[in-house]
């Protein structure tokens, strides 16, 4: 790995060509990744990719004139001082805000590179081109903002907002809701069966704790391995698995924690009240994010919860 100050003019130009090729491909990947969900924003990155390709052609022309046709292989990772870029373009679907933030960082970093490179060269033609490209990278940032103003109209922003909302529901709300429902409902039977069978708050708490954590681990792995998200657009499988697992555990712990109360019947009463709030919360989430009418959601959740609850009471009383 070399220090930037130790690069020759030939290596500086070769590095600039490599950077422009990389940026051009990244913008192209951004455009392709956004095209299905955010088609108007994708057009902005198509144009930015074309402009980076124009920079590359100008650098190549000057390089061939000065040093010939062979370009030494030198990349950003071969030079100290460059920040490693996270490959956000590999995550599908792409988040529009993540892409915009990354593109801003890229433009600022490239402009600084050209400023520093121009200071380290003595050849007039090379210095002029690097200075020109630095100024164009600054204009590129303004150009991107202008393109967004032209292409991203209020109607487009509204469509993109709805798309982002759909992705949020698909990647976060759905697996979290599935986990919350499973944890809140499936653990009712073992918790209340153990409580009534033993009439011991601590024993009921231990059963509920084990059931909640076990269900959380099971649901996390089931969600993570069910779909890698590459075709369905459901995002990172381990993120979905984690959210599903955590919400499953929390759903079970909600009506388990009251059994830390030493008085058994007080603990039973508080736990029963918590169950009512849990089922109401699930119904509200289904209504807000899943477009399910509240009464319909409440009926579905309450009926299922009551059946499992009754099962626990029946077995615990046997």
Image (spheres, rainbow, N blue to C red):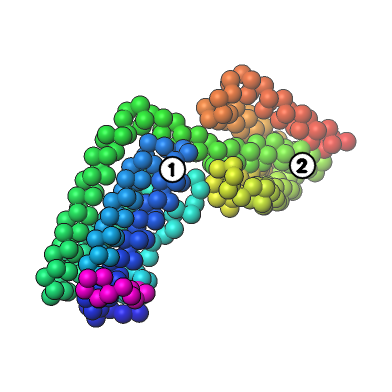
Residue 38, by quadrant, is: top left
Q: Residue visible at 26% across and 35% down?
A: 149
The residue closer to the viewer here, 8 or 273, is: 8
The residue closer to the viewer here, 279 or 19, is: 19
Element marked by disc 2:
helix
Res. 197 in view = yes
Q: Residue visible at 53% across and 30% down?
A: 289
Element marked by disc 1:
helix
Give the main secondary structure of the magenta stretch: loop
Q: Residue visible at 54% across and 46% down?
A: 235
Residue 239, position in %: x, y?
Answer: 55, 50
Res. 246 in view = no
- Residue topped by disc 2: 190
For residue 34, the mark is 1
- In the rendered structure, are the residues bearing label 2 and label 1 in contact, judged by CB atoms less than 8 Å apart? no
Q: Please state the extent of the stretch shown in magenta in the rendering.
A: 64-74
Residue 226, position in %: x, y?
Answer: 67, 47
For residue 96, the mark is none
Q: Residue visible at 32% across and 50% down?
A: 50
Residue 290, position in %: x, y?
Answer: 56, 29
The residue closer to the viewer here, 65 or 99, is: 65
Left or right of 285 in this view: 219: right
Indicate whether 278 appears above or below 82: above
Left or right of 32 in this view: 233: right
Residue 135, by quadrant, is: bottom left
Q: Quadrant of the C terminus?
A: top right
Query: Magenta stretch containing residue 187, yes or no?
Result: no
Q: Quadrant of the N terminus?
A: bottom left
Residue 65, position in %: x, y?
Answer: 22, 71
Looking at the image, tell me whether mark 2 or mark 1 is earlier in sequence order: 1
Q: Which mark's residue is nearer the viewer, 2 or 1?
A: 1
């Amino acid at each position: 790995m070399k220090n930037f100050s130790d690069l020759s003019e030939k290596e500086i130009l070769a590095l600039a060509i490599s950077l422009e090729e990389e940026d051009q491909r990244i913008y192209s990947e951004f455009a392709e990744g956004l095209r299905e969900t955010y088609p108007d924003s994708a057009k902005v990155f198509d144009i930015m990719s074309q402009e980076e390709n124009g920079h590359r052609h100008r650098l190549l022309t000057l390089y061939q004139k000065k040093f010939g046709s062979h370009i030494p292989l030198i990349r950003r990772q071969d030079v100290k001082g460059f920040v490693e870029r996270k490959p956000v373009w590999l995550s599908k679907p792409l988040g529009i805000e993540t892409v915009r933030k990354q593109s801003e960082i890229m433009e600022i970093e490239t402009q600084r590179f050209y400023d520093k490179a121009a200071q380290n060269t003595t050849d007039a033609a090379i210095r002029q081109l690097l200075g020109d490209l630095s100024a164009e990278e600054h204009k590129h940032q303004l150009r991107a903002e202008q393109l967004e103003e032209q292409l991203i109209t209020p109607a487009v922003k509204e469509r993109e907002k709805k798309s982002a909302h759909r992705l949020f529901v698909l990647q976060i709300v759905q697996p979290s809701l599935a986990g919350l429902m499973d944890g809140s409902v499936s653990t009712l039977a073992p918790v209340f069966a153990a409580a009534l069978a033993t009439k011991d708050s601590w024993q009921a708490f231990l059963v509920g704790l084990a059931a909640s954590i076990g269900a959380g681990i099971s649901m996390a792995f089931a969600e993570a391995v069910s779909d890698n998200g590459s075709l369905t657009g459901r995002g990172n499988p381990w993120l979905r698995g984690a959210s599903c697992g955590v919400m499953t555990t929390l759903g079970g712990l909600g009506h388990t924690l009251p059994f830390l109360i030493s008085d058994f019947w007080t603990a039973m009463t508080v736990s029963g009240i918590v169950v009512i709030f849990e089922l109401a919360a699930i119904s509200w989430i289904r209504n807000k994010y899943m477009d399910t009418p509240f009464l319909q959601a409440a009926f579905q959740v309450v009926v299922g919860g009551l059946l499992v609850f009754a099962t626990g009471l029946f077995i615990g009383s046997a």
